[in-house]
Every structure is written in C-alpha cells, then in structure tokens.
Amino acid sequence: MGKNLLELKSLDVSEIVSILDQAQAFHDGEVFRGLEGRIAANLFFEPSTRTQYSFNVAEVKLGLRVVSFNPAGSSLQKNESFYDTVKTFDSFGPDLLVIRHVENEYYNQLLGHVNAKILNGGDGTGNHPTQSLLDLLTIRQEFGHFEGLKVAIIGDVSHSRVAHTNFEVMGRLGMEVCTSGPEEYMETALNYKPFEEAVRESDVVMLLRVQHERHKEKMHLSVEEYHRRYGMDKQKLSWMKDGAIIMHPAPFNRGVEIADEVVECSRSRIFKQVNNGVFVRMAAIKRALWD
C-alpha cells in the first residue's frame, strides 16, 4: 500500500495525470480524513521555504502530526552521516519521510533500509517531482491541456533540478520545451533558443534564479547585465504572445531574472504556483500513505 515519490521519469503519464486529478480535487475543496494521526517527518538538509512549509501545511490539512528537522541543531554537527540521521528518524516510527538533500539521487542509499514512505523534496540538481507537478497543475488550470503548448525555461538551467524534471516530463506530455539564458548555464541537449525568440514563441515563460550556491565559479555577468539581457521586465512583457503566462519555481530574485513590477503582473502565476503546491503535496501524501 502506498508509493514513494522520488522522480517523475519513473511514473507513466496516467500516474502523473492521476496525481494532478487528485490535487485538483483538493484544490476544489475535497476533504480526506483517512490519514489522521499518521506521523510525517520533514527532513530538509538544504534551506527551503515553499517546499518545506507547503508540505507542512499539506500534512496538517490531512490530519497528520508533523515532526520537523533542524540540521543546525542536530548531530550532523557531530559528524553524523546523512544515512544515519535518516535511519534515526525512521527508527522513531514515522509513516512518511519528506527529504531534501544536496546529493543527486540521495534516495538510492535509503531504499530497502527505511520503513517509512519517502517523498523527494528535491535532490541536488537532479529531481524535484512535486515542484514539477505543481507547475503542471498550474499550466493545466490555465490552458486546459498540455499537448502542443510551448514552454521556455530560462536562466540557470544546468544547476536546476526544476529545469531537468520539467524538461523531461513536459516533453512526454506533448509540450514543446526550449531553454534559454547565459551560455555558461546551458545544456546542449535541452533545445537552446535565443532569449527573445524563446519569449516570443512560448505559451509559458518559466524563469529560474541563478543558483550561486551550486556554482564552482562566480557568474561572469554582473547582476545588472544579467537583468538587461535575460531578466523579464515590463518592456519584454510586450514580446509575449496573447494569453502567455510567466512562471517561476521561486525563490525569485527581484531585479535579476525578474523585475519587481513583473512579479505580480497580470501574466504572472508565481503565487498561484505556491498555492497549488499545497494541493499537489496533499495528493502526493495521500498516494504515499493510502493509495
């Protein structure tokens, strides 16, 4: 009973649609009481606001009791390993472990060694399944379909687990996905297009922040030059197609990849994405502990 959610590439399209349908039902007011009293442990080894706390809200809405982890106050400071920390929490007997960690596919070392179900809150530069699902839910709410939509993912693509997850799953769902941004952050296999062309052609313009914490070298462009060349501002909004929307997984850096006046403009769906994150994570929790 129940299933881990580690990466979307291992799910077929029907499973993805099923999660989205359940998330939409929660969005529309469905109440589910079958998980009351279960225990979730949220183990975030990297900083997080939206993912961590929307999981927390989702757990509360479903009646779970929540245990949250503070790395700075834990035995990690005494050189305890990631594996042993997770095993310790699993030994407490929770039903669910929500984990984020800097290592790509960290979950492979845990499978078969923990009893709780695992939901991946993000692994390194690899996967961010619930973020991608909330992006998909937002897009489906806006357009009513996926097939034939054009999506541009713009910014620090090479360091982004959101970009990698979305590029793969959106292609399987029939969307045409391109990437754009500074050449130093591009991957040739991910259909690069010049910035203006990408913005003009796309139904969805998905901006990414520059992930300085993952860089081995300092960004070559100044903040001002990055914003001038790749930042979405009021003038560049005029390039967008009628009905096209702006998305961002956040946190966003105002004045870098997005101008202050664009964050909450009529085309922006950034805070709608945040709201949808609660319902997607409710659906993922139900799938893990009930389906």
Image (tube, rainbow, N blue to C red):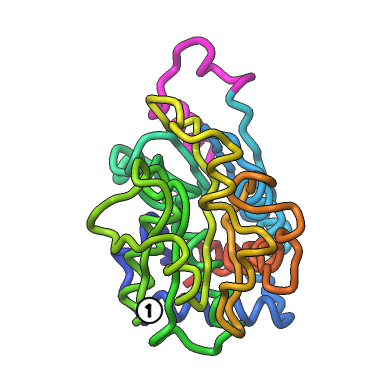
Q: Main secondary structure of the magenta part?
A: helix
Q: Amino acid at mark 1?
A: Met
Residue 212 in the image: above or below residue 196: above
Other-residue count near label 1 (Cα within 10 Å), few / some / many at <14 / 14–19 / ≥20: some
Quarter occupied by residue 54: bottom right
- 12 sits to left or right of 66: left
- x and y percentages locating residue 269 in the rendered image: 66, 69
Q: Is residue 255 above or below residue 33?
A: above
Q: Give the percent coordinates (x, y) of residue 158.
A: 36, 46
Taking the spot 43% from the left edge, 68% from the top edge, the residue there is: 198
- All told, the count of numbered labels is 1
Judged from this view, the residue extending furthest toward the top is 78
Q: Residue at x 47, y 51 (%)?
A: 155
Residue that mark 1 sits on: 175
Q: Quadrant of the N terminus?
A: bottom left
The image quarter containing residue 41 is top right
Q: Residue at x 61, y 84 (%)?
A: 243
Relative height, residue 142 to residue 267 (above, below): below
Is residue 244 shown in magenta? Answer: no
* Residues rendered magenta in the picture: 72-93
Q: Residue at x 55, y 41 (%)?
A: 225
- Magenta includes 88? yes
- Residue 117 in view: no
